[in-house]
Image (spheres, rainbow, N blue to C red):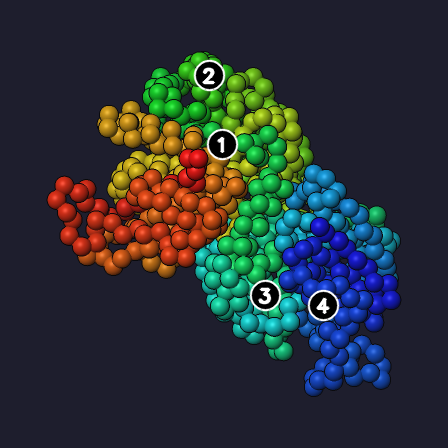
Amino acid sequence: MRNIVFHKETKTFHLYNDKISYIMCVLKNGHMGHLYFGKRIHDKADFSYLVEECQRPMTSYIYEGDRNFSLEHIRQEYPVYGTTDYRHPAIEILQKNGSRISEFVYEGYEITAGKVKLQGLPATYTESDEEAMTLRVYLKDALTGVLLELLYTVFSEYNAIARSVCVKNTGTETVHLLNVMSLSLDLPDQDYVWMQLSGAWARERYIKERTLEQGITAIDSRRGNSSHEHNPFMVLRRKHTNEYRGEAIGFSLIYSGNFRIQAEVDTHNVTRITAGINPKGFDWKLEAGEMFQTPEAVMVYSESGLNGMSQTFHKLYGRRLARGYWRDRCRPILINNWEATYFDFTEERLVEIASKAKKCGVELFVLDDGWFGARRNDRAGLGDWIANMELLPNGISGLANRIEELGMKFGLWIEPEMVNKDSDLYRKHPDWILQTPGRRVSHGRYQYVLDFSRQEIVDYIYGMIAKLLSESNISYIKWDMNRSITECYSIAYPADQQGEIFHRYILGVYNLYERLTSAFPEVLFESCASGGGRFDPGMLYYAPQGWVSDDSDAVERLKIQYGTSMCYPLSSMGSHVSVIPNHQVFRNTPLHTRANVAYFGTFGYELDLNKLSDAEIEEVKAQIRFMKEYRELLQFGTFYRLKSPFNGNETVWMVVSEDKSKALVGYYRVLNGVNLPYSCVKLQGLDPDKLYENELANTKHYGDELMNLGLITTDVSAGEVPQGAEPCTDFESRIYLLKEKQSTN
Ligand code: GLA
């Protein structure tokens, strides 16, 4: 159930479903006021008491002779700066006369069933009109003729509101958009803990928290990608909210470029959240008759803690953001040659790796970097997407056929946005890179960024990649992006449009993705940007899975995958078993622990299985059998975080099937200890009345037992190791399989 009601007499809008309400109204000056976002409440015509007008010191007022009505003290929907409100605005428009003041006044609205598609941008969608309702509120600035369309979608099944803004210049003069947020939300208090997912290369999406205080709290990216450093996602939770109880609001921006998410707590403890394209350096020239569409932002309200919030994101993003053939399909178990060979391979070596993997049950072989042009190291070749015939005498199609003959699918790595100076493409088109005239241009990993703001360059790259995909039997593409953007400037645009280039670049990336995924709908795309540098909802729209991090160590991955799960579903998380000593932290973890972590994702291998012992190969075969049996549950079940790697030595998480007949619990202990305390974890999401068999411990328990008493995870490392028992070591882990015990009568 979802609905949008408009109360004419009070000009109040109420968007709701069974779980949430979102209420706003037209204020007496015609601006939009925000009234409420939270748990579903009764509908009513009048909530005007929430607009608390009163005289306050040091305040500027709208009306002559009135000392009550000031925008500074009113919660708003889409505020502007400088007409009595001094907080950070949602929009700023530079006009011909130099002014940045605007007054957006209500003009009307439209309510439609379903959801509208955003031109050229990734966004959530519906498959039938019953799934959602959309409201457009029209506001106009009389002086400039700029029209705003505030878009709101309320879903029937998800506690989520999707928002975006469309700006139309219906005036006669050109204006410049200097700031145009996708979302602005004024909350009535500041009693929140701000949670962000931040880190660095190989340490992405760690959970970081701080309490909101008067002033600004913000995360952003100015790197041209969403970045390893900050994910376009933020949570406000109440102080006592935990994983299962209490209020949490998640904010997620469906965008892969420069973004900013900010909270401003004002002097009266009102919290203003804004999220959108980073205004830093942004300047979009909007001529008369033109329009600009912002990316979409999604707000999820949960009163069942962080897990409740995450589960809504997982379902919404897994089912109504990710698209296409692979969206609901179990993902192939793959082997990737990167950590096995790096640049040092021949066709024979690759086939050897693939053959062994095939014998173990692997379904897809992925050839990573190094197969094209003059690429024998990272200094050359990017841009020349033609096989190096010295390494691959039969080309990509020959290799792909050999892999197919083995009974496996073939996948390929590309990095289409980049070029090395040592490449035919650069030699032919040195002016195709982003560079500022007259200035030196910086490199990252010896590579330069193609100017994807130019359609002819996107078209050229499309041609090369499409040729490759049509000529060879390619079932999977890993699309990488291995540097951040510097000296961002396009020689194709005039001076007054240079502030558009970062955004135009990402629109070019989306355009290429859209065309390739439409032309080759059955190819599985995995996004990657030096691991998790662009692990964001924008990418998820095109590529249903992404390489979570270049750090493939099982222990490191606990934090990375745990943090990532705050917003993103397991079906989107590329996670592999890699070699030991691990190539990032040089740690030796047991093979079973590497798999036990990687199962909670899309699963694969990142090593040469020929180098494993016979016993290890048997273990790998068993892992693959296990994953094939349970991947539907792992990738599409309901995920619960139970114990956080950020809080201690143990991590526990679990997935439960839709009918609650099966569950898998992953238990991980980083360091071993001596004579450890008893260990137990209360499970979640089971059917209290079902009897479950715990195969590992050979015991049976009702769901209510497991959820209230807990699952005992104490092992032989507690106390003395009995004779004959297998002692535990560091980096221990196990998977508990819980299956509903079918009654025998
Ligand atoms: C990036 C990716 C890796 C690998 C290399 C190849 O770092 O994240 O997985 O593909 O590029 O150069």
**Alpha carbons under labels 4 and 3: distance apart:** 18 Å
Which residue is at a point 37% across and 60% down the rendered structure image? Answer: 647
Q: The C terminus appears in which quarter of the rendering? A: top left
Q: Which residue position holds label 2?
A: 404
Query: Which kind of residue does numbered mark 1 sit on?
Result: Arg
Q: Which label sits on residue 677?
A: none
Query: Which kind of residue does numbered mark 3 sit on?
Result: Ala
Task: Say which label, 2 or 4, has the lower sequence index.
Answer: 4
**Alpha carbons under labels 1 and 2: distance apart:** 17 Å
Describe residue 675's horizontal placement relative to residue 681 as left or right: left
Please name which of the two marks, 3 or 1, marks the residue nearer to the observer. 1
Query: Which kind of residue does numbered mark 4 sit on?
Result: Leu
Q: Which label sits on residue 263?
A: 3
Q: Which residue position holds label 4?
A: 35
Which residue is at a point 26% across and 30% down the rendered structure image? Answer: 616
**Alpha carbons under labels 4 and 1: distance apart:** 44 Å
Residue 404, position as x, y percentages in the image: 46, 16
Task: Name the element at disc 1.
Answer: loop
Q: Which label sits on residue 331?
A: 1
